[in-house]
Image (cartoon, rainbow, N blue to C red):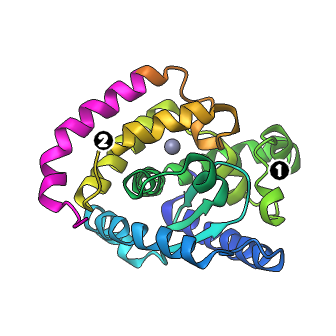
Amino acid sequence: MLVNDNEAAQSSAQAYNQLLLNAERQRVLDADPAMLNRVQSIAQPLIGQAIALRPETRNWQWEVHVLKSDEVNAWCMAGGKIAVYTGLIQKIRPTDDELAQVLGHEIAHALLSHQAEKMSRVQVQKLGLGLGVLAGAVAGYDLGGVAGLADTVATVSLQLPNSRKAESEADSVGIELAAKAGYNPYAAISLWEKMIKVGGSGGPDWLSTHPNPEQRLQSMRAKAQQLMPVYQTNRRAP
Ligand SMILES: [Zn+2]
């Protein structure tokens, strides 16, 4: 890989800080304190499990924020920089268990260095194309529209879809993190069924890389069944 985890975390931190600044100026950052509180309290035990699974991420400056946007989207940058868009909460109306699955899946991408992988791809392409051209090529997912974000390698790579293999890995690790944190693994299935229904307005993470949603749901069902005992041990009080 051209971009290692530390470099990925560093450039992500810069991009994230810039995004937060712009979002604050546009009054789209954490506009609803109750929603922010909900998202952060669901994320906290998942972050704990992420650190248990990959102890070096203890040193990450984990952060969770909510951005006001109609897009159905959420992501976790390298280094544990998380954002959930209000569109996801309002259009999907996830239960706590389902929201935990969204967060678990996105955290898994970061744990598995998928962002660093994509940054390496962007870096390579940048040499020949110029970042502006590349940004145009992946436009349609206008992260810039959310908070006036510059076309950094970190943000452009965030807009590139993950490979199918990366998605399967993130599904699997995400459900595992959630079960260990006490969230129902079957919520992964109900969540993705809702995502499929919302369809076209889904964020970049849920489009294009899943030509066979039925197969994906089947793998998630198998994983959920396998993790039921873990969930029952760690299950959260109602
Ligand atoms: Zn994904």
Residue labelled with disc 1: 131
Can residue 24 be seen here? The reply is yes
Amino acid tagged 2:
Tyr
Single out the residue that lies furthest toward the front: 238
Q: For the magenta stretch, what is the residue range?
A: 215-238
The image quarter containing residue 27 is bottom right
Task: Residue 24 in the image: state x and y as whole percent.
Answer: 76, 79
Examine the structure image and report whether residue 184 is included in the region drawn in magenta: no
Instruction: Name the one closer to the observer, 24 or 238.
Output: 238
Write the residue at 62% across / 39% down: 161
Eyeballing the image, is 156 above or below 152? above
Relative to 37, 147 lies left or right: right
Can residue 169 be seen here? The reply is no
Task: Residue 70 in the image: state x and y as whole percent.
Answer: 73, 53
The answer to whether mark 2 is within 8 Å of ligand 1 is: no
In space, the residues marked 2 and 1 are separated at their CA atoms by: 40 Å
Residue labelled with disc 2: 186
Relative to 137, 66 lies left or right: left
Question: Tag on residue 57?
Answer: none
